[in-house]
Every structure is written in structure tokens, then in C-alpha cells.
Amino acid sequence: MLQRLHLARGQTEKIGNFVVYVAEPTTGEAGKDVAVIYACGAFGLGLINNKTIPDRMANALGCMVYILDLLEGWFLSLCEFTWIRVSL
């Protein structure tokens, strides 16, 4: 069975002192009354799921979804189980 590859559609922005991944709905306009702050664990923004899941949430809920990079570019590598720092 073939699986579809889901690419991240949101944008990385700097808001205040934080790097933030911003996902917005691709269907229709984002509601202005509600937003979601998505918290990701030790895998941070380096794990593609922490971008594609908020993309899907934004479409399903019709609102903006924000993911703060609280680890400041660090994330846990799934392959080596070591910490890696990337520039977002």
C-alpha cells in the first residue's frame, strides 16, 4: 500500500523572541476568534509530524495554529537518539 507524502505547508516566522511555525487553513479564511497553540515535545520542529499535524488541524478547525520553538532549534534525532541543533 502506498502512503501519501505530506509536506509542511505553513510558514516559519519570528514573533517576539520566538521562532514560530504558523499553520493556516488552505480552505477558506481563518477564523479570527479562535487560535490553537500546539505544543510539541522533545522532537521539536525537526520532526515533520510537528508541522503536518498542525497543518491538518488548521484545515479541520478553520483557524490559525501556532507552534513555538521552545527548544530554540534543538530536537531529538529519531535515528541516533542524540540532540541536534538546526537553524530554522
Image: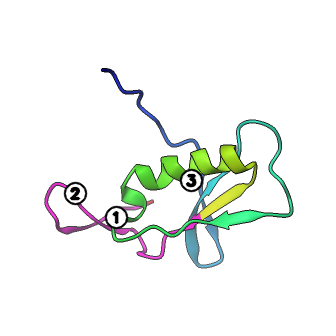
Q: Residue furthest front?
A: 1
Give residue 52's position: percent from left, percent from top.
Answer: 50, 46
Query: Residues under labels 1 and 2: Cα distance?
Result: 8 Å
Query: Residues under labels 3 and 1: Cα distance?
Result: 15 Å
Amino acid under disc 1: Phe
Residue 83 horizontal side relative to residue 60, left or right: left
Whether residue 7 appears in magenta in the rendering, the answer is no
| Mark 2 neighbour density, 10 Å: few (under 14) some (14–19) many (20 or more) | few
N-terminal label among 3 and 1: 1
Amino acid under disc 3: Pro
* Closest to the observer, 22 or 19: 22
Q: Is residue 52 above or below residue 88?
A: above
| Mark 1 neighbour density, 10 Å: few (under 14) some (14–19) many (20 or more) | some
Residue 10 seen in this snapshot: no
Q: Which residue is mark 1?
A: 43
Amino acid under disc 2: Leu
Q: Which residue is mark 3?
A: 54
Q: Residue furthest bottom?
A: 17
* Closest to the observer, 28 or 80: 28
Give residue 57's position: percent from left, percent from top.
Answer: 61, 50
Our reading of the magenta stretch's main secondary structure is: loop
Residue 29 horizontal side relative to residue 1, left or right: right
- Please report the bounds of the magenta region as a residue range: 67-87
Quarter of the rendering occupied by the N terminus:
top left
| Mark 3 neighbour density, 10 Å: few (under 14) some (14–19) many (20 or more) | many
Q: How many tags in the picture?
A: 3
- Give yes or no for contact between labels 1 and 2 (Cβ–Cβ under 8 Å): yes
At a point 51% along the width and 50% down the height, the residue shown is 53
Quadrant in the rendering for residue 16: bottom right
N-terminal label among 3 and 2: 3
Q: Which residue is mark 2?
A: 78
